């Protein structure tokens, strides 16, 4: 029986690479806790633009308000099907995508859109990240970006398509109301009302 006594040397570079990746992940000084969430696996194969992410499929530059501090210029994307904010680590190429802890990330900005985490006990539909459309000192209109899933099959290939089915929250004098459907005209009325009351 032949024993290769030098086989362990082939594993040495892999060990260093793994250690280096771990150190890079932990090396984020002020925002290291931001990247300590569970990893994300996209289980829904899509073959067209009908994916579950807000905006393009790729990561975008954004900001996250995490533990009371804005973390700027971070690559993020928002899964509207599972209501998950996802991060790409800036210093560790190839590192897995991380799910942000929503209990610690109360707000995020993606492009021109601003999102707030709402958790209103006892009101169905008033949980998760909502886009802030307009607000003043006592009222606000928020939009829930929500995707619905549909399984498809073509040429023996199973894939998924997602359709956006948003709904709204209206906040006035300490009370939230869920608005299941809103026409562009009704949205304009709410936005006008809020801006006039400022």
Image: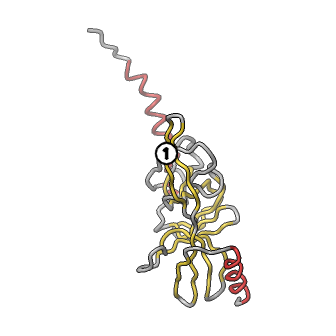
- Give coordinates of residue 189: x percent, y percent: 70, 82
Residue 126 or residue 89, whichever sits in front:
126
Q: In which quarter of the image is residue 112?
A: bottom right
Residue 29 or residue 70, whichever sits in front:
70
Residue 135 or residue 18, whichever sits in front:
135
Residue 191 or residue 3, whichever sits in front:
191
Query: Residue at point 60% right, 49% down?
Result: 90
Quadrant in which the N terminus is drawn: top left
Instruction: Determine whether the residue tagged by mark 1 lies in a helix, strand or loop.
Output: helix
Relative height, residue 190 to residue 161 (above, below) = below
Query: Residue at point 66% right, 85% down?
Result: 136
Relative height, residue 43 to residue 79 (above, below) = above
- Give coordinates of residue 100: x percent, y percent: 50, 59
Residue position for label 1: 23
Relative height, residue 185 to residue 198 (above, below) = above
Give the left or right position of residue 8, taking residue 109 as reference: left
Quadrant in which the C terminus is drawn: bottom right
Q: Quadrant of residue 115?
A: bottom right
- Give coordinates of residue 175: x percent, y percent: 52, 87
Q: In which quarter of the image is residue 80?
A: bottom right
């Amino acid at each position: 029986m032949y024993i290769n006594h030098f086989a362990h040397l082939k594993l040495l570079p892999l060990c260093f690479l793994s250690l280096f990746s771990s150190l890079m992940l932990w090396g984020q000084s002020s925002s290291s806790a931001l990247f300590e969430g569970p990893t994300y696996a996209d289980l829904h194969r899509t073959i067209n633009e009908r994916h579950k992410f807000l905006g393009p499929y790729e990561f975008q530059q954004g900001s996250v308000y995490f533990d009371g501090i804005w973390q700027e210029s971070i690559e993020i994307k928002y899964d509207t099907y599972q209501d998950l904010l996802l991060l790409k680590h800036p210093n560790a190429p190839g590192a897995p995508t991380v799910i942000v802890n929503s209990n610690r990330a109360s707000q995020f900005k993606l492009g021109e859109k601003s999102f707030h985490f709402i958790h209103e006990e006892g009101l169905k539909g008033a949980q998760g990240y909502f886009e802030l459309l307009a607000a003043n000192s006592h009222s606000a209109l928020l939009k829930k970006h929500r995707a619905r899933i549909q399984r498809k099959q073509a040429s023996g290939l199973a894939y998924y398509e997602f359709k956006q089915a948003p709904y709204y929250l209206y906040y006035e004098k300490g009370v939230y109301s869920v608005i299941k459907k809103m026409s562009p005209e009704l949205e304009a009325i709410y936005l006008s009302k809020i801006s006039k009351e400022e």
